[in-house]
Image (spheres, helix red, strand yellow):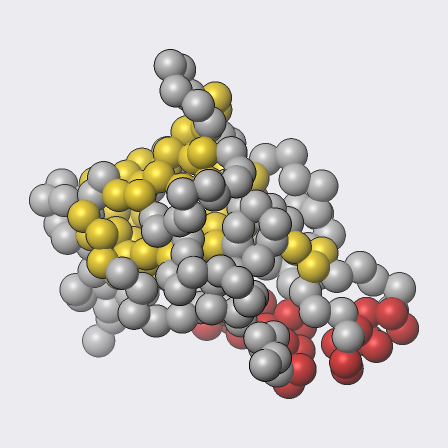
Amino acid sequence: MDFRPCAKSLFLDVWVEHVIEEVSTEDREGNKGTIEGPYYVPGSPSLETPATLPMRADESGTPLLFPGQVRAVDGTPLAGAHVEIWHADDNGFYSQYAPGLPEWNLRGTVVADAQGNFALNTVQPAPYQIPADGACGKLIAAASWHAWRPAHLHLKVSAPGRQLLTAQLYFEGDQHLSDDIASAVKPELVLHPQARAGAAGNEVTYDFVLDAVRG
Ligand SMILES: [Fe+2]
């Protein structure tokens, strides 16, 4: 069984999607987003905040506490907003695409509380290379590029009456922030985690401001 996204889909994700995303969201107020990428799976488990993403008992990687708030552009908290998150594991692999990973590993939909606040526990993902065989691999080789993406969290943040925000969040210090093969990094999307006081791992706060759906 081939778990990789098909070559045509991968080509569009890597070399076309970021251009479409820039143009289609240039008038949007609130947070910047970026591309969805090829590893999204709808319908991940719904989790109450504070949440821990589904993971193996021995999941490797630096623990990450990620709290934040979802608000409207005018500052109104968006109660019950959905923060859908998926990301690679500490080896750069996604559940439902790489063999041997439990279904929904490191994927979940956190429901914010009445003040729009959410908090989730996960582990920091690793950078990974996009599949470099087939047509995409030939293009990468011909252009003397590399196939790396910086480590990132994928998110879809939504609330009734608000535009869906699709984003990726990156990590300060990642060596591929400036040469992402998918050209999806924006300065506003780079996290600055701090070591947790009195607990293992890192913590970073990041808020999401969602623009209204326009008629
Ligand atoms: Fe990804």
Q: How many marks?
A: 0
Q: Residue furthest top?
A: 198
Q: Nearer the viewer, residue 139 or 32?
A: 139
97 left or right of 197 in image: right
Q: Looking at the image, which residue is at 35% across and 51% down?
A: 54
95 left or right of 151 in image: left
Residue 207 visible to the viewer: yes
Q: Quadrant of residue 211?
A: bottom left
Residue 33: horizontal and vertical position, in percent?
Answer: 45, 57
Q: Nearer the viewer, residue 89 or 16?
A: 89
Residue 95: horizontal and vertical position, in percent?
Answer: 48, 62
* Quadrant assignment for the N terminus: bottom right
Q: Nearer the viewer, residue 97 or 81?
A: 97
Q: Looking at the image, which residue is at 75% across and 61% down?
A: 147
* Quadrant assignment for the C terminus: bottom left
Q: Residue furthest left?
A: 114
Q: Is residue 64 above or below residue 40?
A: above
Residue 126: horizontal and vertical position, in percent?
Answer: 60, 46
Q: Looking at the image, which residue is at 66% across and 78% down?
A: 11
Q: Looking at the image, which residue is at 60% across and 53% down?
A: 92
Residue 29 visible to the viewer: no
